Amino acid sequence: MIHHVKPARVALVLLSAIVPFVWAHAQDGPPANRPASAQAAPTPPPRRGGAGAGGEYKAYDAATLEQGKKVYTANCAFCHGGNAKGGETGPDLLRSLTVLHDENGELISQVVLNGRPDKGMPKFNLPPDQVADIAAFLHDGVRAAAQRGTYKILDILVGDPKAGEAYFNGPGGCTSCHSVTGDLAHIASKYDPVNLQQKVVMPREGRFGRAAGPAAASGTAITATVTTPSGEVVNGLLGRIDDFSVTVTDQSGKPHTFTRDGDVPKVEIHDPMKGHFALLKQYTDADIHNLTAYLETLK
């Protein structure tokens, strides 16, 4: 018996055989006489990791970065640390997706101007130019962190030890808590100049409230006293505080969380490093370099 195949079906069979053949040969590369405009575009080079330029690192002038550092230090350093790598209550901003995905400050400005009440971050009424300076400072910090393998620490002992001593004993107010014959005796024998300067600009690394952390062991942890309307008093390490609640951990390791309504319950915060953080807003580069040079003499 002879079966008659419809022409349309024959065409479909032929087409299904021809297309794979043409496609396979097309992958071998364009023919020599193929117009250049029709050839596949070259694969673009991989883009570098983010922060402010769509995947490319921007270059900022020194004046912008210096201004960004000043504005950041005055408004953000207490929570996020002097180098933006995390501090009292704030996270590491150099690893923040908001910063990494930011383009010219658009995302950062939303956080700065609106705050994050759910995470205890207040809003800051800063003008656009200052927000842009903060964004530049953070973007450059991301670049520096990504390229840290090429960074070389040069001699940082460029300050005047005598000027540092005068600042230590005078306007710095350091002698109110420290003594060169007591807690700071031979400190330069314990730390190199880089770490000495780090301790000046980052007086307490990490976040408060870690009962087993170095801050608690060294007596630099933030503590709090909570007094309820009924007269109950709870003392302990401060774990978290915002407009809605406060958590402290007592000596037995038990956490206590209280709902806040304005000034109720009464909360007294005790921060032994308060003076250091106040100085972060006052330090000049010369003060920091001079202090480092002076501390280096205490061997």
Image (cartoon, helix red, strand yellow):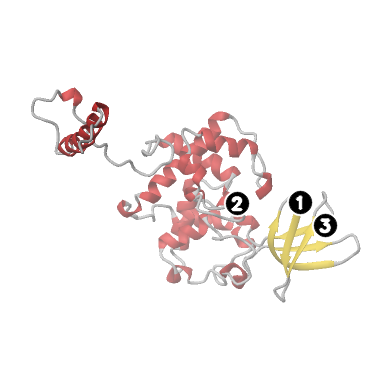
Residue drawn at x 46%, y 57% is 292
Q: Hey, what amino acid is under mark 3?
A: Lys
Determine whether 187 is above or below 268 in the image.
below
Q: Hey, what amino acid is under mark 1?
A: Phe
Q: Dot 2: what SS? A: helix
Q: x%, y% of residue 140? A: 42, 42
Q: Which mark is residue 79?
A: 2
Q: How many marks?
A: 3
Q: x%, y% of residue 271? A: 67, 60
Verify CB contact (< 8 Å) between mark 3 and mark 2: no
Separation of disc 3 and disc 1 at Cα? 13 Å
Residue drawn at x 23%, y 27% is 7
Residue pushed farthest front?
A: 1
Give residue 71's quadrant in the image.
top right
Mark 2 / mark 1, whichever is N-terminal:
2
| In-front residue for pair 133/52 | 52
Give residue 75's quadrant in the image.
top right
Give neighbour class at mark 3: few <14, some 14-19, many 20+ (Cα, 10 Å).
Answer: some
Give neighbour class at mark 2: few <14, some 14-19, many 20+ (Cα, 10 Å).
Answer: many
Residue corresponding to mark 1: 244
